[in-house]
Structure formats: structure tokens, C-alpha cells
Image: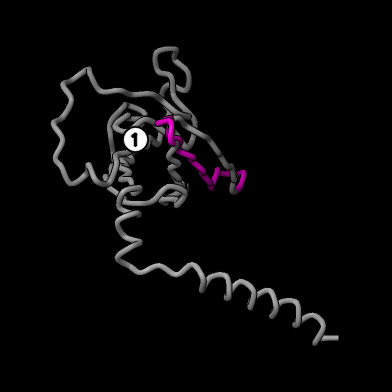
Amino acid sequence: MMRNRLFPAVSVFLVFAAGAKAQEFSLEELLPGLKERAVVLNIVARVVEKNQEEVWNSANSKVTIPGRPVGLKLVGANIVVAVQFTPYLREDGHNMLVAQGQIWIDVPNEGIRYQTTLQTIPLAFGELIYFFPLGSVSLEKGEKSGEARIEIQIQMHPYAAAAVPEEPAPAGEEKTKPAS
């Protein structure tokens, strides 16, 4: 009986291995194609306290290829936030960024709460977006005012353009859009 279970698995592996061998590429052939499609995600994570004072921040640039996620993990005294950002490039120029988040919060006298988030965000190259893993805060309307928040800024650029230094946009001309 054990032989019958093993045989289909071994045959599937052999078929996969035979198919993989037929599609071998040299490293020199593969790298230029990856460089052309690679993107850079500039990620700035901040914790802003109740009085709007920034108490922590971290800035990173990560190189990836479309479809491959970039992870970010924030750990605090009573919270853990794990987020993955996966870029997808479309031929028509309407790129997408998928944001997947998992949040664990230790609530006093209640225990640990767990929540997830999944968002698909349209994103053009150079556009700055904001992602709020705990939800957005609208201070103009007074909603959730007085609460601390976690804010993640993401900007995507083509990898080839990352080697060329960019002129910063004049104040007020930066394209931004919130995502929560």
C-alpha cells in the first residue's frame, strides 16, 4: 500500500524535473530580463503618537521583481504588524500594489486580538501612497483623534531608473494618495 502512494509522487517529480531541464537559461540571459522588470520599493514606516509627534521611523529601499513580495515587520511592546507589499506591472502602465497585513494586538484585560487586511492599490511609478495597517485616521473630522497610529509610505520606481539620481519634486507637487 505504501508503494502505491509513493509511485504517483515520484512520477510527478520526474515529469516536473524533465520539464524544468528543457527550460534552462544561462545566468547572463536571465539577468538582463530581470533587471528590466525589477522595481524598487521605497518604504518609510512611522509611529505617530497622540500629540502628532513622530516617535519612531525607519526608511528602507527594497529591490524586487513583479509578483515577488517585500516584507516589513514592526514589533512594539503590545503590537506586532507584519506587512507584505507585492508589485504587479501591467503593459498598459496601470500598475498595482497588493498590500497584505497581519496585526496582533495585546489588549489589556481582553487578550490578544488578531486582524488581517488585504488591499489592491493602483500605483504609478513615482507616486507616493500611504498605508495605515491599523486603519486610517481623519484628523480633520475628529475621528480617532488622540490615538497613536502606524503610517507606512510606499513609492515604487523602475530599478533601471534607481541608478539615475532624481531631482526632488518641489513642495506641494508630489503625487500622493492615502490607502487604508
Residue 177 located left or right of residue 28: right
Q: Is residue 139 visible?
A: yes
Q: Is residue 72 visible?
A: no
Q: Residues within 10 Å of mark 1 (few under 14, many from 20)?
A: many
Residue 12 located left or right of residue 155: right
Does residue 19 sit above or below 81 in this rendering? below
Taking the spot 51% from the left edge, 43% from the top edge, the residue there is 100
How far across and how far down the image is residue 19, in percent? 57, 70
Residue at the extreme front: 22
How far across and how far down the image is residue 7, in percent? 76, 82
Q: In the rendered image, which quarter contains the N terminus?
A: bottom right
Does residue 125 sit above or below 100 in this rendering? above
Amino acid type of disc 1? Gln
Does residue 51 sit above or below 40 in this rendering? above
How far across and how far down the image is residue 14, in percent? 63, 78
Taking the spot 29% from the left edge, 65% from the top edge, the residue there is 28
The region drawn magenta spans 91-111
Residue at the extreme top: 141
For mark 1, what is the residue?
A: 153
How far across and how far down the image is residue 144, in percent? 47, 23
Q: Nearer the viewer, residue 89 or 17?
A: 17
Magenta-drawn stretch contains 102: yes
Question: What secondary structure predominates along the stretch shown in magenta?
Answer: strand
